[in-house]
Image (tube, coloured by chain):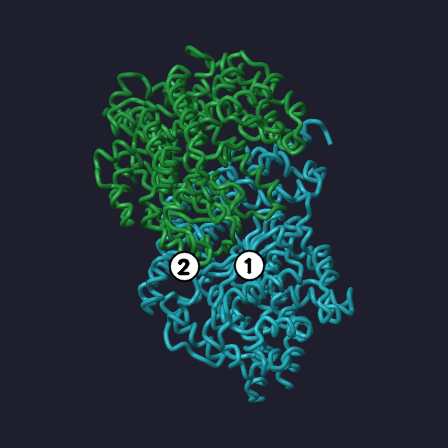
Chain colours: A cyan, B green
């Protein structure tokens, strides 16, 4: 590498390292705000977060950044860069182009709109009043359509939004993936309902002291490989994981004294996200690649751990005795198989976040189709509630009694996050593909789970997925791990096998 | 105000507001690091703190700041400013002049030196090896002397350092203040020792469950006016208070299962600092004046609450029944008077941070005299341990058996904080002056303490001291509250009265 180029690279690396430092600081402030910051200081704290976020944003679209990108992304030069620098250039370029094309005035208006809109949504949901939210949603869609025009698009206009959350995924891909998944899921749900075997889950309605729940969550997290020297478990209104740096990846959960499932599966889910980020390669620390490859790949890790591992019979073969020791009274008349069936109960329900593994994807597909139609101009906001209810009936066989439990249930649209929902099902799809690859590489991995041995599984995930951070794109990870491109075959197989076992279909 | 000036003021205010936002962010990161950040993430977190601190420092000495200061501190203009803007200009100017005069290279060397020196000090203390610390201390002193030459000085060279921590305080003032305080303290100590009345404090050597200690600390803090909606109490290795903004001022303490005094008085002390910052005027929020007036004034608030209030007979007349309810077994054979005497036991000891109210100031005066001699060139580092031991014998009548418990006990010098120690005793001096003023304004305040009524005292402190933040300088506060300038008369009186009561002199 020529001397000049070397010094540009060095300057670029320290410029982007500073950006990553800001991201980390903002992350700590956000975690603090959600886990215990005193309420009277919050307004001023939001101001602080705003200041740092603005400064970070400005660095990303600065003249300095532009000069770096012009020089370093010139094809001959780009080829000469080391892989990490190349990855950082790629990500900065994407962000630069996305941000810099939007006139600042327009973007500012949009930020103000989404802030107001989130408050309007909260009110509308509380009062079950879609009409009150309607004008906000209309405007948010208008801005998003304007942005798409500015950014440009290939094929469907929705593709541009999808690409922000899951690079490389398009409407064409999703339509294919989801068509099969939807038909098979609906059929499977029908079969379960026809089987008519009720699952008894009433034993969950007991009292589970919060301290014991916390200790049990910690016990399980430790066993499955969450490193408490590089993280901590706290309580928050909504569970989340936040990767500040690979040595500090925190998880939260919430404790319901009358049901331990929410805290336990919530913390296993978040630990899936966290174990991912705790194991990002050391050489990526302090770079902008020190995070997950995409929303979908991230979600694959949380869902793999929560569902494929955490709700498996093998997992509870290992942990059910421990659980019974923590809560001897609550489970004294329940055997392992009853417990396993209860945590895998399938039941069409109105609310996405409470849905089981099977019906969850149907909730997502419904949202995907509505978003696509709204962005594509094939559905008017006024017709949205009716379209929602109709799809609920088609896919899940139930119709929300009101909009609060229907079209108004999710925060996403009020913040403008169109294109985000598919990541959840992509996570499930990736997870099942990874599981098939894991089974091929470690054929007896389910036996190790029974024995409480997770280290081989964790090493496999670390090596195949985690260590790369955002260095590789989702499709590169997928193809290097599985040798295939994205497909829903493995998820369908997984669901069919699982519910055959749970419900004896 | 002319249109032009108005817009400069506005720009200056938003420029310095951004600086304050950075300070707040750095504060949150620091709190997090000291209360529970996972250990594996700390190296990278220090990097983040370094980045934000550097950026904040650069704003303070930037060309933009220079232009603001040139325009706004021009006498005619300065006069026209509102008091808050004037205060911010004053503080920024002080900081600008201090920082900008030091060549960056020299400052950088010094930062590296102090970092290494703190590690060297830790090692040296552990191994009781002053010689190993000697070269570091020598160099740190050399840099400080160089800085003083650059900054300039009036009278004694040490004055320049003093002024950083306590504006307006000089060697001349301290020598006067301390001369009387030292003579009277030594005499009082002699009288107590001659009295020969042993205090029984053995009942503290019982087991005090940490959870009960925490609940009792919270109970007391709530009663004395610490607002838990604008703060929180956590545990850390060394107790501290940190004012992030007036709506978020956090305190920490440490819990020893075998002695509740450290946690309780530690948290009352920190609550004194915190109640100060929680009650800074709303109009100062987000400005660089949103902090205490000086180290000494800050310390006066913590010591007032911890000692003058928290170790008073009236305070325990109110709280002793509560304490006995929290710890019924531990205190069942101890009456209020015995307890009062025990928490006010006087005992010359080697370690400053464990010293009682009377001997504490002697520890400070010893350090002050040694610092002054070192900076003034009247004492060589090689002669420091002997000088330390000699003064210990003179003032406290005891000689450290080793340097670890003598000259090596404090972290301050290893970080270059020469000029800081006097603040502790200035805090005691101010506190006693404030107490006299409080007694004049609210003659029955001690009666209200007995009844657990703290609101009138708190309002008085809020109004006289707290609300001003850093808007007023220490001497302005002192003179507006007490009508006098600084003097040690009230502290001497307070100590004489107190120990006459405790020891029946």
Per the image, label 1 sits on a secondary structure element best described as loop
Pick the quarter of the image with the N terminus of chain B: top left
Pick the quarter of the image with the C terminus of chain B: top left
Q: Residue at x 60, y 21 (%)?
A: B385
Is residue A100 among what the camera can see?
Answer: no
Q: Exactly how many numbered labels are in the figure? A: 2
Q: Nearer the viewer, residue A465 or A241?
A: A241
User: Mark 1 or mark 2, which is nearer the start of the sequence?
Assistant: 1
Q: Nearer the viewer, residue A225 or A474?
A: A225
Residue B204: x %, y % from top left: 48, 48
Residue behind mark 2: A414
Label 2 marks a residue whose chain is A
Residue B87: x %, y % from top left: 32, 27
- Tell whether A235 sits left or right of B319: right
- Tell whether A265 sits left or right of A314: left
Q: Which mark is residue A155?
A: 1
Per the image, label 2 sits on a secondary structure element best described as helix
Separation (CA) of disc 2 from disc 1? 26 Å
Q: Are marks 2 and 1 in contact (CB under 8 Å)?
A: no
Q: Quadrant of residue A457?
A: bottom right
Q: Residue at x 53, y 24 (%)?
A: B392
Q: Which mark is residue B463?
A: none
Residue B237: x %, y % from top left: 54, 43
């Amino acid at each position: 590498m020529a001397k000049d180029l070397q010094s540009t690279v060095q300057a670029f690396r320290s410029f982007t390292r500073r950006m990553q430092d800001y991201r980390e600081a903002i992350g700590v402030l956000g975690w603090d705000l959600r886990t215990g910051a005193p309420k009277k200081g919050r307004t001023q704290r939001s101001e602080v977060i705003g200041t740092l976020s603005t400064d970070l944003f400005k660095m990303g679209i600065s003249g300095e950044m532009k000069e770096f990108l012009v020089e370093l992304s010139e094809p001959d030069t780009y080829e000469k860069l080391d892989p990490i620098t190349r990855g950082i250039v790629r990500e900065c370029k994407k962000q630069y182009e996305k941000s810099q094309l939007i006139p600042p005035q327009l973007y500012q208006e949009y930020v103000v709109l989404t802030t107001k809109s989130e408050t309007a949504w909260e009110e509308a949901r509380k009062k079950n009043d879609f009409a009150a939210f309607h004008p906000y949603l209309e405007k948010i869609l208008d801005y998003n359509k304007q942005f798409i025009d500015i950014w440009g698009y290939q094929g469907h206009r929705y593709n541009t939004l999808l690409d922000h959350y899951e690079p490389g995924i398009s409407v064409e891909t999703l339509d294919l993936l989801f068509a099969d998944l939807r038909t098979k899921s609906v059929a499977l749900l029908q079969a379960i309902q026809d089987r008519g075997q009720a699952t008894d889950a009433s034993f969950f309605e007991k009292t589970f002291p919060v301290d014991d729940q916390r200790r049990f969550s910690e016990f399980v997290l430790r066993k499955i490989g969450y490193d408490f020297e590089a993280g901590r478990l706290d309580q928050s209104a909504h569970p989340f994981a936040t990767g500040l740096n690979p040595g500090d990846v925190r998880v939260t959960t919430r404790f319901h004294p009358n049901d331990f499932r929410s805290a336990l599966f919530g913390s296993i889910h978040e630990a899936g996200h966290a174990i991912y980020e705790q194991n990002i390669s050391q050489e990526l620390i302090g770079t902008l690649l020190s995070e997950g490859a995409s929303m979908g790949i991230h979600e694959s890790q949380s869902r793999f751990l929560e569902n494929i591992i955490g709700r498996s019979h093998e997992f509870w073969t290992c942990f059910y005795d421990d659980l019974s020791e923590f809560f001897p009274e609550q489970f004294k008349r329940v055997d392992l198989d009853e417990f396993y069936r209860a945590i895998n109960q399938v039941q069409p329900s109105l609310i996405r976040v409470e849905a089981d593994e099977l019906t969850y994807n149907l909730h997502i597909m419904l949202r995907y189709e509505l978003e696509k139609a709204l962005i594509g101009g094939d559905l008017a906001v006024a017709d949205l509630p009716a379209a929602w209810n109709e799809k609920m009936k088609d896919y899940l066989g139930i119709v929300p009694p009101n909009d609060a439990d229907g079209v108004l249930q999710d925060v996403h649209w009020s913040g403008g996050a169109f294109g985000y929902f598919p990541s959840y099902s992509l996570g499930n799809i990736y997870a099942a593909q990874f599981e098939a690859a894991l089974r091929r590489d470690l054929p007896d991995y389910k036996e190790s789970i029974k024995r409480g041995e997770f280290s081989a599984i964790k090493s496999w995930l670390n090596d195949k997925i985690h260590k790369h951070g955002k260095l590789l794109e989702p499709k590169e990870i997928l193809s290097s791990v599985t040798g295939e491109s994205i497909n829903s075959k493995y998820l369908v197989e997984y669901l069919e096998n699982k519910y055959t076992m749970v419900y004896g279909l």
